Amino acid sequence: MDIKEIIVVEGKDDTTAIKRAVNAETIETNGSAISKETLKRIAHAQEKRGVIVFTDPDYPGRRIRAIIEEHVPGVKHAFLSKEKTIAKNGKGLGIEHANVEDIREALQNIYTPSEGDPSEVITLEDLMTARLIGHPQSKMRRYRLGELLNIGMTNGKQLHKRLLIFQITVEQFANAVMQLDQEESNE
């Protein structure tokens, strides 16, 4: 699998994991304190070949994603769930622990954020009705919804924004919520 875009990862071990799974170039942020030079390299890569942000599903990974999104508009995003990135010994979490198939699948399910202001389709009221915010099970439901829609784990505010950015349709949202409800009723 050849990837045209340059993949932004957190460190050397992530680069090694990516190169095991696909043929791609990477830029390493070396942690969540992204330097101005690294942001310039990412912006240049975005102009020349496009960029895919593929960070760990944890707070530092989400922080890196947010910083890049703010400074380099239009980057694409690939996501893996926490379960798919846990080290074999259970100590540690990251893209470097994911298996080759999961990395390839995440890169096939890439989202390109839309340009300009998205028209609000899914409202905060919809999120409340779907028990994704303001409900005891909200966090767990948001986590699973992020997996189903390949948009990553978010808090309530981020979920609303991410649904808009990635232009998740009302139909896609409704189908994912229906699947969530079915899974819960089967437990």
Image (spheres, helix red, strand yellow):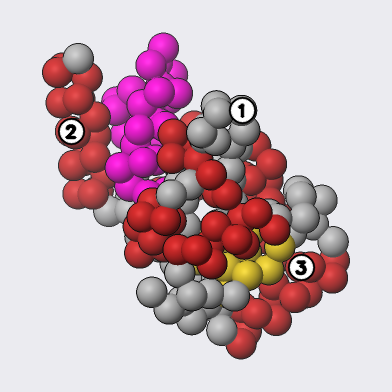
Mark positioned earlier in the residue sequence (2 or 3):
3
Three-letter amino acid code of the residue under disc 3? Leu
Q: Which residue is mark 1?
A: 91
Q: Which residue is mark 2?
A: 178
Residue 131 is at least partly visible in this image: yes
How far apart marks 2 and 3 lie (CA) works out to 39 Å
Q: Report the residue that reaches farthest toward the front.
A: 89
Which of discs 2 and 3 lies nearer the camera? The answer is 3
Residue 158 is at least partly visible in this image: no
Q: Which residues are magenta?
A: 123-152
How far apart marks 1 and 3 lie (CA) works out to 30 Å
Disc 1 on helix, strand or loop? loop
User: Which residue is located at x 39 percent, y 61 percent?
Assistant: 104
What x and y, as percent, mark residue 31?
76, 50
Is 135 contained in the magenta span?
yes
How far apart marks 2 and 1 lie (CA) works out to 34 Å
